[in-house]
Amino acid sequence: MTSDGSAERLPPALRTEALEQLLTERGLVDPDAMDRLITQYETNVGPLNGAKVVARAWTDPAYRRRLLDDGTAAIAELGFGGPQGEYVVVVENTATTHNVVVCTLCSCYPWPVLGLPPSWYKDPAYRARMVREPRTVLSEMGLELPGDVEIIVRDSTSEVRWLVLPERPAGTEGLTEEQLVPLVTRDAMVGVARVEAP
Amino acid sequence: MSAPLNAEGPAAPPRSNGELVFAEPWESRAFGMAVTLYETGVFTWPRFQAALIARIAAWEAAPAEDECWSYYRHWLGALEDVLADGGTVFAGEVTARARALASRPTGHDHPDGHGHGRPH
């Protein structure tokens, strides 16, 4: 599979540029359209989308039920979808159960609601260690969980992309859906952090 | 590239709570090519994903000593694998074109304004 001849190490930036030129010449990519696509992923597709999903679920029990029953469909209700948005399964964190997401094989991640994965999510150490010693890794990432909280590690694949519905923090009962959105972080929706009250 | 790079302020991208999505410009181009070709039906996403998994697994089984972990290097490799398998672009063509680009005179590193990877 390393048919490019790994003996020759051309910098990836050069190979990328060469490939883009060849594909453009063959009419398979349009650099300007690609600019727009990249900008879209850099600016508009991100965890803010997921935060809106979570805040809706916290404030609308019927939506929460639909979200847990069929993540992709409930997320699409809010207008979010696209590549890596299929087969999203939402799991709920509670006071006694903590879900955390990893992709041991590569980097499966629900792009439409979280954007593109951060570097640590793709890192071999995170991917290998979260399965073996989740409590330790979570602690290193700043999340200390009481010993009686059950940790469930969810391994994302192309068939299932997990999204965590974080626990709504105490003290936020009076907040509106709009006020809850900014509290929800990407890390909480991956399960490596909790949502904190403001 | 016209993408805004200011990570501060009210217009800050919501993408990842302050973290840049792409460390180097070429990573964004490799990403954009794969998504574009998937969206236009050149290959299926599971096909690309399988190639990416294979690339990562091969590296993890035998990491190159002089090469640190680079996710998008594997992404690019997977893209090249899928395109070669489909007869769309062959590795030799990419290598030849990249060599030609490498021999450009200094000062022509950024001819199309897209920018390219900083040395690291």
Image (tube, grey):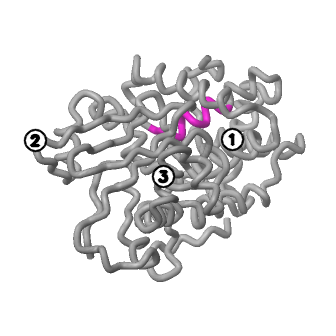
The residue located at (43%, 68%) in the rendering is A59
The residue where tag 3 is placed is A65
- The extreme front residue here reads A62
Q: From the viewer's perspective, tell me whether residue B113 is left or right of residue A194.
A: right
Which element carries disc 3, helix, strand or loop?
A: helix
| Numbered range of the magenta stretch | B70-79
Residue type at tag 1: Ala
Q: What residue type is labelled 3?
A: Arg
Q: How far apart are marks 1 and 2 (CA)?
A: 43 Å
Frontmost residue, A5 versus A66: A66
Identify the image quadrant of residue A100: top left
In the rendered image, the residue lying farthest to the bottom is: B10
Q: Tell me the residue that label 1 is attached to.
A: B34
Q: Where is residue B107 in the image (x, y as percent from the top left)?
A: 65, 60
Residue A90 visible? The answer is yes
Dots 3 and 1 on the same chain: no
Q: In this view, does B37 lie to the left or right of A64?
A: right
Q: Which amino acid does label 2 sit on?
A: Gly
